Image (cartoon, rainbow, N blue to C red):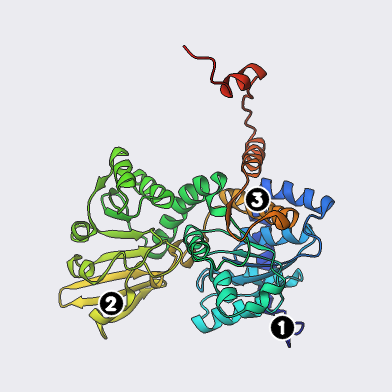
Amino acid sequence: MAGVEQLRYDIADRSLADDGRRRIAWAAREMPVIRLIRERFEQEQPLAGMRIVACVHVTTETANLALTLRAGGAEAIICASNPLSTQDDVAAALVDEGIAVFAIKGEDSTTYYRHIHAALDHQPNIVIDDGADVVSTIHRDRRDALNTMIGATEETTTGVVRMRAMEREGILAFPVIAVNDAETKHFFDNRYGTGQSTLDGILRSTNILLAGKVVVVAGYGWCGKGIAMRAKGMGARVIVTEVNPTRALEAAMDGFAVTTMARASAIGDLFVTVTGNINVIDSDDFGRMKDGAIVANSGHFNSEINMAALAEMAGEGRRILRPFVEEYQVAADRRIVVLGDGRLINLAAAEGHPASVMDMSFANQALACSYLVASAHELEKRVYLVPTEIDQQIARLKLHSMGIEIDELTDEQMVYMSSWEQGT
């Protein structure tokens, strides 16, 4: 499209690049697996000639992924996957490295989608998506991008759900690797990363004491497990709400109180949604909440909290108390506090996941891109899991970086485990 070569970046302030470089280097210290992959990529050039659009949270960790993609021979083009998650100094540092970046912290919805289109103007071969907004934009509005696309990867549970829906409807136009579903991603990134960074964002924005608080966690997937575990460890009384009976049972067996949102909404001090669904906290729930209840979201989109309903209930009775903290006066004697405009609180008010867990997530992304290039001609237009050998390779690299050795099966044990003839 016209103007592609001229539009190389749209960021807040290029003068912030030095700060970004220092922070990117700091994150790299905690990312030994992606470093090893980068060194291998420099030698093997598995992504040579590829144009990769990465719709990501523009943080120090994703900067290290972008540099790894470039080391493998790719042209990396970056756009934001969430309007509040961009770190402007990181965006500036990447632009100084010659990487096209379209991301500004706090950008509105119009700018967000303009940036997605600007990235797609580069006619990518691969998309690294985080919530499926780029893939859905390609299918809905940018069919021209299909001329060059060989495949995509997806980082989030929400995005994988959307892409599997596209597959079921028969409209998915290229293969997708569900990076989110790799064991070395969701076991660690979702549980340990989300668990810690969500509470980090809540505490940075509010400075409340969790000990003694009633914390309601909506959803007991891997993210919910991590948040519930960390909140309990800090002295909170944790209540879990769920719609999945197996997960609800697991939460109960893990020692958490389990009930409905209708009941929990009347007693919770702090509410955190991590379901990937819509209106998990709705107008009726707001109506039951006590004065001063705090509501936050750590799911990918801000749809989990019915912000429109809350705004209607409050009318003009809204005020900003601190950065990322807004109070809604819903009755003469009741106020509800929302953090980060209902968006990802761990990235809106904090720095996102620790680099050491993103090390594994982005190792999956880098190797999944390499796999797409090598295997695209064999793959159908559907959603695939990360190959087990890649998942286990990443786990072994991480163990090696931690100085941990494990056993290997003997020949006798391998025969035994693959045989039906030996028993009691």
Residue kind at label 2, given as amino acid type: Ala
- Label 1: state its secondary structure: loop
Residue pointed to by mark 3: 363
Identify the mark at residue 289; answer none if there is no mark. Answer: none
Q: Residues within 10 Å of mark 2 (few under 14, many from 20)?
A: some
- Distance from the alpha carbon under mark 2 to that under mark 1: 39 Å
Q: Is residue 45 left or right of residue 268?
A: right
**Residue 211: % across, % down:** 30, 49
Seen from the viewer's position, the closer of residues 298 and 16 is: 298
Query: Which residue corresponds to the image point at 51% horizontal and 62% vertical from the top-left?
Result: 159
- Label 3: state its secondary structure: helix
Visible residue check, residue 104: yes
- Label 2: state its secondary structure: helix
Dividing the picture into quadrants, the one containing residue 116 is bottom right
Count how many numbered circles sit on residues in the image: 3
- Distance from the alpha carbon under mark 3 to that under mark 1: 29 Å
Tell me the quarter of the image containing the N terminus: bottom right
Residue kind at label 3, given as amino acid type: Ala
Dividing the picture into quadrants, the one containing residue 343 is bottom left
Q: Residues within 10 Å of mark 1 (few under 14, many from 20)?
A: some
**Residue 202: % across, % down:** 39, 60
**Residue 186: % across, % down:** 51, 49
Question: Mark 1 and mark 2 in contact (Cβ < 8 Å)?
Answer: no
The extreme top residue here reads 424
Visible residue check, residue 13: no
Which is more N-terminal, label 1 or label 3?
1
Residue pointed to by mark 1: 7
**Residue 280: % across, % down:** 31, 64
The extreme right residue here reads 43
Which is more N-terminal, label 3 or label 2?
2
- Give the vertical position of 32 relative to 80 (above or below): above
Identify the mark at residue 309; answer none if there is no mark. Answer: 2
